[in-house]
Structures are given as C-alpha cells and as structure tokens.
Amino acid sequence: MKIKKLTAVSLIIFAPLQIAFSQPSAPREVPAKSIPVPTTVSPEIQKQIAAPLTSTWNVIPTTADGWREQVTAGALATEKIIPALLTKLDVKVEPTLIDGVKAFVITPATISAQNKNRLLIHVHGGCFVSSPGLSGTVEAIYMAGLEHVKVISVDYRMPPDHPYPAALDDAMKVWSATTKTHDPKKMAIFGSSAGGNLTLAMVLRAKRENLPLPAAIAPGTPMSDLTGAGDSFQTNSMVDNVLVAFGANCDQRAALYTNGHDPKDPLLSPVYGDLSGFPPTILTTGTRDLLLSNTVRVHRKLRNAGVTSTLQVFEGQSHAQYYRDINAPETKEAFDEIGLFFDQHLKK
Amino acid sequence: MKIKKLTAVSLIIFAPLQIAFSQPSAPREVPAKSIPVPTTVSPEIQKQIAAPLTSTWNVIPTTADGWREQVTAGALATEKIIPALLTKLDVKVEPTLIDGVKAFVITPATISAQNKNRLLIHVHGGCFVSSPGLSGTVEAIYMAGLEHVKVISVDYRMPPDHPYPAALDDAMKVWSATTKTHDPKKMAIFGSSAGGNLTLAMVLRAKRENLPLPAAIAPGTPMSDLTGAGDSFQTNSMVDNVLVAFGANCDQRAALYTNGHDPKDPLLSPVYGDLSGFPPTILTTGTRDLLLSNTVRVHRKLRNAGVTSTLQVFEGQSHAQYYRDINAPETKEAFDEIGLFFDQHLKK
C-alpha cells in the first residue's frame, strides 16, 4: 500500500525534530484501535459508516489512460443511481451549453414561491478529475429536489486532459454569463469537496475581476488546502472511509489539477486567500471527515474576516457523506440547513 | 493501564454483533499512528498540542480521601496561575454567598457600555468533581477580562461529598436569586465541560420549573452525554491529550456525580432532553476534542428543534483548550465569538 510509504516518510521527517525539541514538535503516539459503528446516527448513516474503505482509495493509475478508465468506471456506477433519484425527487436534468461550457439545468417539478426567481450554480466534487457529465449532478439533484430550487451544474473540463485553470475558467464563464441574465443577489454557488474548493476559488476570482459576487455560498467539506496542511489529514487518517488518507487517490487527482502550479496559490488552496468581503457562507462537514480541519479552518478564517458564516458538523460522517443516501434523515437536515441559509441571504 | 481493560470490554460487547450482522456493525480498524503537531494553529496552541497526556488522565483514586487529595492538588496548581491572570486582564474576584450558595463575583476594571446592565452566570468545568473554590474561576476571569462584562461564577457543591443533584441545585439557586435582582433578558449562562453540561441542564430545569430562561447560553464542549455514546469518544481516543479516552479519570468523576442515577436522565445527559424553546446557543469545541461528537450532537439537536445555534470548532484543539493560554490568539477568538453572540442576543 502506498500509504505505508507516506507514513514512513513522515516518521523520517519528524523523528529528528522530536529529538531536537521534544516539546513543540512532539507527535502524538496513537495506538491501533477498532472503532465501532456509533449508535448516535440514523440507521442509514450507520450503514455508510460500517461500509468498507472506498475500493479505489489507494489505487493510483500510472497513465492518463489509466485515469480515464478509472474515472469512467466511477461515472458509470454513479449514473446508474440517477434515474431512480430523479423519480424519487421529481426533478429533471437537461444538458445545455453556456458560453461554450457544458452544463446541466436541473429543475424540480415544484419550485417554491420564495425560490421562483432564484438560481443556484453548482460545481461538483470528484477531486478535480472524477464525476464528468451526468455523474457530477447528484448533489445538484439533491439540492433541487429537496429545496425546490432551480440549479445549473457546471460540467467543467478536467485532467488528465485539462488541468488548472480549465475547471475554474469554465465555472467563471458560467458565472459571468448567468449573472448577465439573472440578478446575482438572487444567486448562490455551492458544491462539495473539489466543488467546495471551486466555490471558494470562484468568489476569490470574482473579487479579483470585479465581477458580481453571489448572495451566499455553501462550500461543503472544501478541499481548501492542497498543500497537505490540516490536522485532520492525520487525526482522521484511516478513520474516514471515503478519502481514507492524505496522499492517496484523491490527492493524486488534485495533483493532476495543480499540474506543477504552486498549490499554495489561493486559487488552488483558497484557505490562503483573502476572504474579506465574502458573501455569507455555510460550511458542512462530519466528525470523521479527512477534511474536517480544512473545513473549520475556512470557517475560522471567514469569521476572523468578519464574514457571516455558519458551520454544520455531522456526527460520525466521513467525507461528503451527507449526499450519499437520500433516505438518511441527516441528508435532508444538511440540505434544509443550506436551503434555509440561502433563503435568509438571497433576495426573492 | 486501565484503558486497555476498557478496550477489551468494548471488543467483547461488539464482537457478537459483528458476527450477527457483519455490515451495519463492522468496526473501523485503524492502525497505530504518530500524529505530528500541526502547523495550522498558533505557536501557543502548537505548544498545547505538543504537550504530553495530562498526568492524571488515568490515575483513578480508590477512596473518597484519594479523590479529595487529587482534587486539592489540581486546585492548588490552578490557583497559582490566577494572580498573574487577574493582573494581566485587570479583573477582580470576590467571594460571595447567594441564597446560601458559594460563588464569586468577577468584575473587570472596565465594563463596556453595552454590558453595563448585563450579567453572566458561570458554571465551571472539572468533570463535576474538580476545580473547587477559586480554581473554578479561570474561565470566568477570561470572559470578564476579554469581553468586559460582569460574571458570577457558581462554586457549586461536588462529589465525593455531594453527588447529583447538589451541583445543579446550587446553580439553580443562584439562577433564581439573580434573576430576581437582574433582568434575565440581560443575562446569559456559560461554562465548559461539566460546566457545559450544567449550563444545558439549568435551562432544562428552568423550563421544567417555569423559571425565566437566560437570553443566550454558551456551553463549551459540554459533557452532554454521560452514557458513553458519541463517536469521538472512539475516534479521538488517545488523540485528545486532555481527557485522553472514555472511561478514564474524567468519566470516573462523572460517575461519582451520577452516583447510581440513570445517566440517560436529561438532567444528567442533556443531549437526551427536549431542547425546544432553548435560548440562542453558541457551542465551542476542537477537532481533537474527545467531546467533539457530544458538542456537535447538541448543535444538531438544537437546530432540529428550531433553536438559533452557532458552532465553532477550533483546529487541532483537544478538550477545552480554548481557555488554557491567555496569549493564544485562538483564545481571544473563541471568547470574542461568544461575546459577540451574547451582544447580539442580550438586551442592553
């Protein structure tokens, strides 16, 4: 397993420091443990927690074709669940092209009165490489169906063919175009994981380019720091059963995205950006999330910049498990909180 | 080490379930790891994170006198830091008696204009047994000094001499008495750990007894569940360097408090209470906190009951480390957030 090599490397890095200054760099030695499934979550979330580690968490393709094959397999598996989801939530998904960028228009059968003139822009997750096409719309379908609001989900270009800044360029094109036809005060941007990163990066770029800002944003468990910093990369290592450990498959995909650019660039790691002037922001994560730290760090940074920001942390959940089971009560809770937050901050 | 015995017990409890239903009860097997001190917090918090496990975390006295000795030693150590803290924050502490209950009046040299008529009631931590007398006022001194507001800290009776409900009875006496001389709409209750438990239990009892409720509360990393439920008891076991592991010293102290009562009684484990009608609540915890789960569970339960509630989670912090170092910027951050929240919800 590659992860063992990483652990060995980190031991080599930290051992000399430990000898030199035993106090400030003393690592915490945590023994092996067997963590039971908690009883403090719904049966649906218990099932997710009990699931084995994601099968591909540390299967790293070595060629561009290898990546394409892995991504296609994942996308096909996800696409299979979509028809039933659309039926259950009474939502339709239509492909479109916005200023040359592929996207999907996601419309619930019923749009609530307060959301009649509102539009949400969705940027999907998948560690910047996965979830192309229809497979990237799952979170947007949840939002449209549960919160009765229209969503446009950006099917942005991805590595291995299109590294940074292609995804962000595409998302910004959709943002620019839609804010010309819709009032940005009635718009929000949301997305989880890589989509959380892109949500934050879009606001940083909109600020930089003097474009209108959304009225609110909802970055879910954002990949806000691609440098590897963030304590929960260590504390929740092998505890999170989705991403599992730092340096594994997801971070290898992120490396295809950064593609030699400095990962500390705020457009790649938004936690290092100037977050002042950000719109009201609601963040979502779980106690077992490998990105727990990189979610709460963004929350603290926003609060210190004087931004209205709310944090929700779900018991026992690993990375982005709040949109994996439409029947889990925690799923509805998470989306209802975001829906309520948007309702409080978007004009009608 | 006692903790090894506990682990063995939990393995016995969960093994048969695992055999019966391999999916929903499959535990997560986490290998041993060495967790470095994160660079994503201030040098002051890095120092706290690098500190060894609390020396008494699993030293369990076997007699009442043994407990008294341990508590006295801890109290003396804490009292030593108080004079410098009072000087630094320009705060004075005066003992008083309120309806027969011992308490301290904590007054900053400067009370801010908006806080002139406000009064905060503090219930200290210490796992229901520790931090008697002056040693229980540290958090109250931080609050008074950093937020420029008057605080009364309750020096409630504790085990081994006075188990439940003595502490809660004392706190309620102070609450009843002070709400007769002060407008409860200008009052809040706060406290961490056992003090967070008591803060929540006080509101449950005030509801039950038709007493006025505070205008806001700030339970910090509350011991909201004394039954042992809460996923971070496992995930942050041996990661948190303050409480360290479930079933150790702190929980033994809590058992002296419950003293044979059903720990699931909401007045002992407030997470099981009816939290509807609660005043606006701000909760504070850290990503390494053994009580991370029992903080976020209260947050979710409050939100589901329609209560205004805010959650702040500090990177890398173990249990209640936000009031351990007055020089850590995160300390001021935590108290300023609570101060701002009180300012938004208390009448002037």
Image (cartoon, coloured by chain):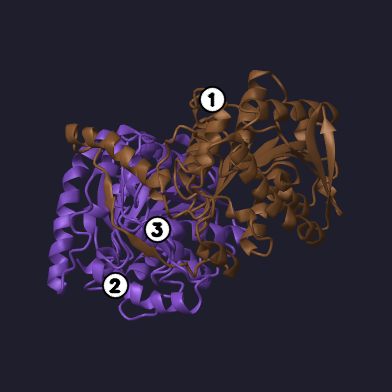
Chain colours: A purple, B brown
Query: Within 10 angstroms of label 2, few (less than 14), some, or many (20 or more) residues?
Result: few
Q: Could you give the CA–CA distance between mark 1 and mark 3, rounded to whole angstroms?
A: 33 Å
Q: Amino acid at mark 1?
A: Asp
Q: Residue at position x 76%, y 58% from top?
A: B85
Q: Give how far across and how far down residue B307 sits, in percent.
A: 57, 34
Seen in the picture, residue A319 relative to A301 is either above or below; the reply is above
Q: Could you give the CA–CA distance between mark 2 and mark 3, rounded to whole angstroms?
A: 16 Å
Q: Give how far across and how far down residue B78 sits, in percent.
A: 69, 53
Q: Chain of mark 1?
A: B
Q: Could you give the CA–CA distance between mark 1 and mark 2, rounded to whole angstroms?
A: 49 Å
Inspect this view and state whether residue B181 appears: yes
Q: Amino acid at mark 3?
A: Thr
The residue wearing badge 1 is B274
Residue A8 numbered tag:
2
Q: Give how far across and how far down residue A76 sits, in percent.
A: 15, 53
Q: Secondary structure at mark 2?
A: helix
